[in-house]
């Protein structure tokens, strides 16, 4: 079977509802500052100039950080409200970042395109059966030698009921 797995519309609607009905500052994954791990990676000089991708960008704080450091920044999330918030924050910060609503399992980018794919809150949201499709899509868009940085933070998990309920339903 060679069909692409796609993120469910139910999952997308759940995330969109979360951003529409809760203050961004109160969401546990919205730290209000760039990830320390991302800062350390960028300051190490391991990521060459060029295109980078922030997946599941949320309000865009990490994407904005990357754009401020001179990277050609692209960012994707599945819910329009978060992308709108991210675009407003980038405009206030005076940086350009290509924010897009999209399915992380079916990215609208060419293969071998990014020097870095940064994941501050995406992988742990996929059910075990979707994780291979997720990793394959990340690998597809990374340049040879490109880096994938995963920062997983879940105390709950959307894809497996044994991790608990989605806390914002």
Image (cartoon, rainbow, N blue to C red):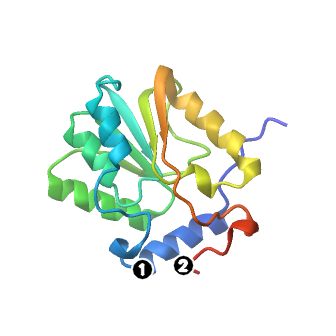
Mark 1, residue position: 22
Report the residue at 58% width, 65% height from top: 155
Residue 101, position in %: x, y?
A: 46, 54
Label 1 element class? loop
Frontmost residue, 88 versus 126:
126
In the displayed structure, does residue 55 sit left or right of residue 123? left
Left or right of 131 on screen, residue 155: left
Q: What is the distance, in whole Å, between disc 1 and disc 2 at their CAs?
A: 8 Å
The residue tagged 2 is 168
For residue 136, side relative to residue 54 (left or right)? right
Q: Secondary structure at mark 2?
A: loop
Marks 1 and 2, the one that precedes in the sequence? 1
Q: Which mark is residue 156?
A: none
- Name the quadrant of the C terminus: bottom right
Residue depicted at x 25% and y 61%: 88
Expressed as whole percent of the image width and height from the top left, the position of residue 22 reads 42, 79
Tell whether label 2 touches label 1 (CB within 8 Å).
yes
Image location (x, y in percent) of residue 50: 31, 26
Q: Position of residue 52 (x, y in %)?
A: 38, 34
> For residue 48, what is the image quadrant?
top left
* Residue found 50% across the figure and 27% down from its top: 142
């Amino acid at each position: 079977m060679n069909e692409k797995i796609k993120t469910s519309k139910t999952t997308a609607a759940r995330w969109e509802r979360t951003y529409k009905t809760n203050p961004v500052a109160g969401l546990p994954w919205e730290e209000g500052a760039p990830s320390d791990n991302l800062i350390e990676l960028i300051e190490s000089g391991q990521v060459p100039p060029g295109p980078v991708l922030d997946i599941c960008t949320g309000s865009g704080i990490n994407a904005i950080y990357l754009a401020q450091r001179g990277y050609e920044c692209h960012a994707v999330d599945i819910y329009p409200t978060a992308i709108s918030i991210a675009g407003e924050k980038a405009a206030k910060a005076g940086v350009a970042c290509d924010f897009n609503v999209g399915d992380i399992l079916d990215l609208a980018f060419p293969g071998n395109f990014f020097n870095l794919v940064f994941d501050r809150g995406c992988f742990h949201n996929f059910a075990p059966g979707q994780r291979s499709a997720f990793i394959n899509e990340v690998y597809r868009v990374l340049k040879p030698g490109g880096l994938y940085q995963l920062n997983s933070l879940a105390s709950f998990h959307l894809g497996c009921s044994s991790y608990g309920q989605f806390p914002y339903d």
